[in-house]
């Protein structure tokens, strides 16, 4: 096989990278997902559009963080990474199925990590693919299993008096402060992107503060000063789920037992799925990380 060449990613590469990531993540889900869960499907048109928007946003804020691997001039893999304050984050990473296990992923991760070499801390969400786990552990990451909570919310379990309001761009400083306290670095410009795509809930009281971005009744990123505030935000998100429609709360680590408690009280089912990988950082809490913006 011809040698792979690694070069910087450009906005023109984004649609092909989106297709490549959808295809390789679907193959992992088909291999690894528990049989009791519904058959995995490819990414919807809406989710592909969001993947592309998010990747273009990261290319604009961090043009040096994303790379493509080519064989015979054809893209076969990519890595998208970025820095926020002194934390390096890997947003997305995949190699085409017929080129996996040949060392291309190792070369891509090395250049992406080089972009973060001034950062002490690192964060990423790992799939359950053994190849990914090998790469991340060899790169110095600690792996913490994640739980997903899925099912239809038992509305009779939703507690009253949640003291949560709608958030807006005026909350940016509060959001960044909560990020620094929980994960050691603000999301900064990523909040503008998230605000444009998700409902934002905020709780800011003398007893505690927190925020939560919501999609289809599930928290997709949540940070709080204390577990009680975090739980109230998660309940508010679940309460907004369409009646009788299943929700999926992802990325619950062992450091966030409060989220497991809320999910179980709402009668959701727990499944282990992938890992939170951290370097020189404890798993953030009370916190539910975003899959790619972490
Ligand atoms: C994860 C991924 C990007 C790595 O790229 P890659 O080109 O396959 O990686 P490499 O060949 O450099 O390294 C793979 C490692 O797994 C090993 N490996 C290869 N096939 C394997 C298998 N079937 N089972 C277990 N390990 C395997 C390789 O020997 C190598 O380990 P080593 O360097 O210690 O010898 C790629 O496999 C992929 O796209 N997977 C599906 C999508 C995914 O999970 N992406 C990561 C999301 S967080």
Image: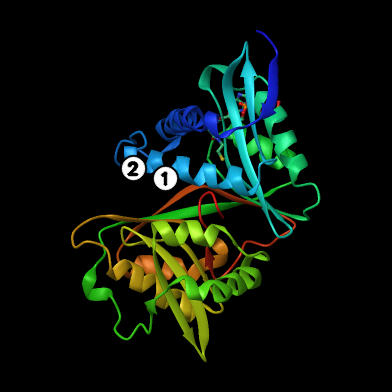
Q: Label 1: few (<14), some or many (≥20) within 10 Å?
A: some
Q: Nearer the viewer, residue 274 or 164?
A: 164
Quadrant of residue 180 in the image? bottom right
Residue 34 visible, this orientation: yes
Total tally of numbered discs in the picture: 2
Instruction: Give the residue furthest to the bottom.
Output: 206
Report the residue at 37% width, 85% height from top. 163
Quadrant of residue 216 in the image? bottom left
x and y percent of residue 208 in the render?
52, 85
Residue 50 is tagged as: 1
x and y percent of residue 274 in the render?
52, 45
**Distance (Cα) linking label 2 and label 1:** 6 Å
Report the residue at 19% width, 63% height from top. 243
Q: Label 2: few (<14), some or many (≥20) within 10 Å?
A: few
Please determine whether, in this image, residue 208 is positioned above or below residue 43: below
Report the residue at 70% width, 42% height from top. 137
Q: Quadrant of the C terminus?
A: bottom right
Pointers 2 and 1 in contact (C-beta within 8 Å): yes
Report the residue at 68% width, 66% height from top. 184
- Could you say whether the residue bearing mark 1 is in a helix, strand or loop? helix
Ligand 1 placement by image quarter:
top right
- Could you say whether the residue bearing mark 2 is in a helix, strand or loop? helix
x and y percent of residue 12 in the render?
53, 30
Residue 46 is tagged as: 2
> Left or right of 84: which side holds 15?
left
Disc 2 residue lies near ligand 1 with CB under 8 A: no
Please determine whether, in this image, residue 184 is positioned above or below residue 292: below
Please determine whether, in this image, residue 167 is positioned above or below residue 75: below
């Amino acid at each position: 096989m011809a040698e792979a060449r690694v070069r910087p990613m450009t906005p023109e590469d984004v649609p092909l990278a989106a297709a490549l990531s959808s295809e390789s993540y679907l193959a992992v889900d088909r291999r690894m997902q528990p049989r009791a869960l519904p058959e995995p499907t490819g990414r919807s048109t809406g989710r592909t559009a969001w993947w592309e928007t998010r990747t273009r946003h990261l290319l604009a804020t961090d043009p040096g963080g994303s790379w493509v691997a080519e064989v015979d001039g054809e893209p076969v893999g990519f890595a998208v990474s970025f820095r926020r304050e002194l934390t390096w984050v890997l947003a997305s990473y995949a190699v085409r199925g017929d080129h996996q296990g040949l060392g291309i992923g190792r070369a891509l991760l090395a250049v992406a990590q080089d972009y973060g070499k001034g950062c002490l801390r690192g964060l990423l969400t790992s799939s359950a693919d053994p190849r990914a786990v090998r790469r991340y552990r060899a790169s110095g990451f600690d792996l913490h299993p994640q739980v997903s909570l899925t099912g239809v919310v038992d509305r009779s379990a939703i507690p009253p008096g949640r003291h949560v309001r709608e958030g807006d761009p005026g909350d940016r400083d509060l959001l960044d402060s909560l990020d620094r306290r929980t994960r050691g670095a603000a999301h900064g410009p990523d909040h503008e992107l998230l605000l444009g795509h998700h409902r934002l809930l905020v709780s800011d009281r003398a007893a505690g503060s927190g925020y939560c971005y919501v999609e289809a009744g599930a928290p997709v990123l949540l940070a709080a000063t204390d577990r009680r505030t975090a739980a109230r935000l998660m309940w508010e998100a679940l309460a907004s789920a369409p009646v009788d429609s299943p929700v999926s709360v992802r990325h619950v680590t062992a450091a966030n037992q409060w989220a497991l408690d809320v999910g179980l009280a709402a009668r959701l089912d727990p499944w282990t799925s992938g890992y939170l990988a951290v370097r020189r950082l404890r798993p953030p809490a009370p916190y539910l990380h975003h899959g790619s913006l972490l």
